[in-house]
Every structure is written in C-alpha cells, then in structure tokens.
C-alpha cells in the first residue's frame, strides 16, 4: 500500500490561552462584527474567509479550509496578528488559504469605515465586509 501525505500549511504553532499583550485588540467598532474577506491584494477573494474580534484582543475565524485563531497586537491604526494557528484540514482551497495567511501575517495597519475593515502591510491588502453582506 502506498501512503501519500498532503502538504498542509500551518500559519503557526498552537493556539494558546495566554494573557493578551499590553494594548492588544482590534479597533473598537470591530467588536461584535464578523468580517468576511471580500478582496485580497485588490482582487475579489472567491473562497470563504472570516475575521472576528473577541475580548482580550483575541482574533479568529474561518479560513478557506480551517478554523483559525490568534492575538491582535497594537492600538489602531497599528495592527499585527500574532500567534496565529489553524486546524489541520486539507481541502481544494489550500492555495487561497496560504495567500490569506500570508497577507494576514504581513498586516501592520488596520482601517475601518464605510462598512469595510482593511488590513495592510508588506505591499498586501485584505478588504473585509460584514459577513452576510453582498
């Protein structure tokens, strides 16, 4: 019998229940809203990915294949996702998932307004809209 392994990108090691860093958290108006990724680097994002902010600076959501979580550092407009980890399921959207995690890890700035949340950094951009919106 031949065993084949499927390469799986993991954004980081494991989720931890550590205390939030000083000044951690997303923008105040992002709380309670689940955001859906609409554009990645200026192009429509055809897969599903979400971002949510929780108390204590925790962030997380669903990537195209896996649930993910981590910690937000910085005080808006500064932003950095740290300790990001995901479950380890493979699917046919792994390329989109890898692009999502790469852009998320490059993000250093967060902007909100006009019904959008934008993360930017390293020449990358992620544009989120409230989940459930067209």
Image (cartoon, grey):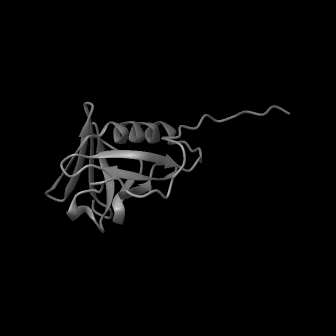
Q: Would you place residue 79 above or below residue 121 in this image? A: below
Res. 31 visible in picture: yes
Residue 19: percent from left, percent from top: 42, 58
Res. 46 visible in picture: no
- Outermost left residue: 114
Q: Nearer the viewer, residue 55 or 65?
A: 55
Residue 115: percent from left, percent from top: 18, 59
Residue 8: percent from left, percent from top: 58, 38
Q: Residue drawn 27% across and 52% down? A: 128
State the image quarter where residue 33 is shown: bottom left
Screen quadrant of the C terminus:
bottom left
- Outermost bottom residue: 32
State the image quarter where residue 24 is shown: bottom left
Q: Would you place residue 21 above or below residue 130 in this image? A: above
Q: Residue drawn 19% across and 51% down? A: 76
Q: Residue drawn 52% across and 51% down? A: 66
State the image quarter where residue 58 is shown: bottom left
Residue 1: percent from left, percent from top: 86, 33
- Outermost right residue: 1
User: Horizontal placement of 4 versus 74: left or right?
Assistant: right
Q: Nearer the viewer, residue 41 or 87?
A: 87
Q: Nearer the viewer, residue 65 or 10?
A: 10
Q: Residue drawn 29% across and 40% down? A: 107
């Amino acid at each position: 019998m031949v065993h084949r392994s499927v390469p799986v990108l993991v954004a980081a090691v494991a989720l931890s229940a550590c205390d939030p860093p000083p000044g951690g958290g997303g923008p105040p108006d992002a709380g309670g809203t689940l955001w859906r990724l609409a554009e990645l680097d200026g192009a429509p994002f055809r897969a599903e990915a979400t971002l949510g902010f929780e108390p204590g600076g925790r962030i997380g959501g669903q990537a195209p294949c896996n649930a993910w979580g981590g910690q937000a550092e910085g005080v808006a407009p500064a932003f950095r996702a740290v300790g990001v980890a995901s479950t380890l399921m493979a699917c046919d959207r792994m390329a989109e998932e890898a692009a999502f995690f790469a852009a998320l890890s490059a993000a250093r700035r967060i902007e909100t307004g006009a019904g959008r949340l934008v993360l930017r950094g390293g020449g990358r951009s992620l544009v989120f809209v409230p989940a459930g919106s067209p």
